[in-house]
Each structure stands twice: as structure tokens, then as C-alpha cells.
Amino acid sequence: MAVNRKQQIIDAATKSFSLFGYKATTMDQVAKLANVGKGTIYTFFKNKEELFDEIVSTLISEMKEAAEQVIDPQLSFFENVHRALYRILEFRKQHQLAIKLFQEEREMGTPAVQEVIKKLETAIIAYIKQKIEAAIEKGEIRPCDAEITAFLMLKLYVALIFDWEKNHEPLEKEKIAELFELYFLKGLSK
């Protein structure tokens, strides 16, 4: 029963954070949504931050899982990184909590939310870095600074998917893959 109650609280908090954002979510709201007394929440979580952290850790795991699902050992390193990054950013665009967090960070700059965004980005970069290191080891790509490369790959994706769309028609998934390959695999040299 205790695990069930804890999950009830997590689900209610996720719903509240997704609807109202971090700043506007209160423990009273979570208790009401979870249909438990406020004291019950404190038997599982010290405070709102701890509860939020648990939810964000789950979000990160789900994001990595989504990326892993599209990886195909038959495909090249670049195709797999493209598929994984595209899936991660798709996940970010469709997941209600992620949408709300990015919106709150933009509009209010809530420190706790900025921390979470940083944590999300760090997790994505670490994930890509592992894939890069494995590709270097297999001799698929030449040695490079895996962390900087992962950072640049992520930033290129964010720029092509989110920033480009602000003033242009959204790019097709294939076009993004083509640009990604051009800048990372071939380079611009003749």
C-alpha cells in the first residue's frame, strides 16, 4: 500500500508540475490531487524540491529509454546518433512536463527549473558522449573530445529543430539528418 501511495503522490505532483509549473505547484495542491493528507507526502519526500527531483529523474530515464528504442546496431554511428537525438527532442516537444518546464524557464527563469533544464541537458550530453566514445573505440569515427562533440551535436539539433522554426518552415527529419551528416561527418571542405 505504501508504494501505491508514494506513486499516487508522484503522479499527482507530475500532473501539477505539468499543468501549473514548478513555481505555482504547492504541496497542498499535490495532496489534494493525490487524495492524501499533506503529512503523507512528507513521509516520502522532505520537500517540494525532493519530490520534483524524483520526477525529473524519471523523466530523464524515460527520455534515455525513448532514445534507446530507436537505436539499431545495423546502422552507422551517425544514423543512430541522429535517430537518438531526434527522438529525445521529439520526446521533449511532446512530453507535457518537459514542455511546461522549458516554458517556465523561458518566461520566469525559476532557479529550480533552470537547475532541472541543466540536469536534463547534462544527461543528454552524457548519453551521446557514451555513444561517441563507443564509436571511437570501434574505429567508426576518429578520436575527438567526446563531451564537446556531444554538446555540439545536441546544440546543432536544438538549433535546427527549435530555433530554426521561429522564423522558417520546420525542417523535415530527413533534411535535419542530411545537415547533421554534412556538418559532422563530411565537414564543409571540398
Image: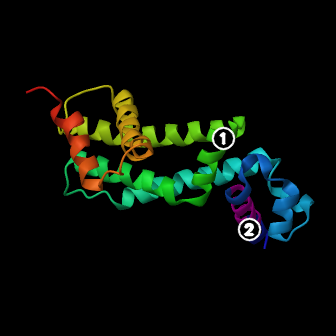
Q: Residues within 10 Å of mark 2 (few under 14, many from 20)?
A: few
Q: Residue at x 71, y 55 (%)?
A: 17
Give the secondary structure at mark 2.
Answer: helix
Q: Is residue 22 above or below residue 151?
A: below
Query: Closer to the camera, 180 or 52?
Result: 180
Quadrant assignment, res 153:
top left
Considering only vertical position in the picture, is 154 above or below 2? Answer: above
Q: Main secondary structure of the magenta part?
A: helix
Task: Give the distance between the C-alpha atoms of the residues marked 2 and 1, in whole angstroms.
Answer: 35 Å
Q: Which quadrant, please, contains the N terminus?
A: bottom right
Q: Amino acid at mark 1?
A: Glu
What amino acid does circle 2 point to? Val
In the foreground, 166 or 10:
166
Tell me the magenta residue range: 7-17
Q: Position of residue 117 (x, y in %)?
A: 58, 40
Quadrant of the rendering where the C terminus is positioned? top left
Residue 115 percent location from the top left of the image:
64, 36
The numbered mark, 2 or 1, whose residue comes first in the sequence reads 2
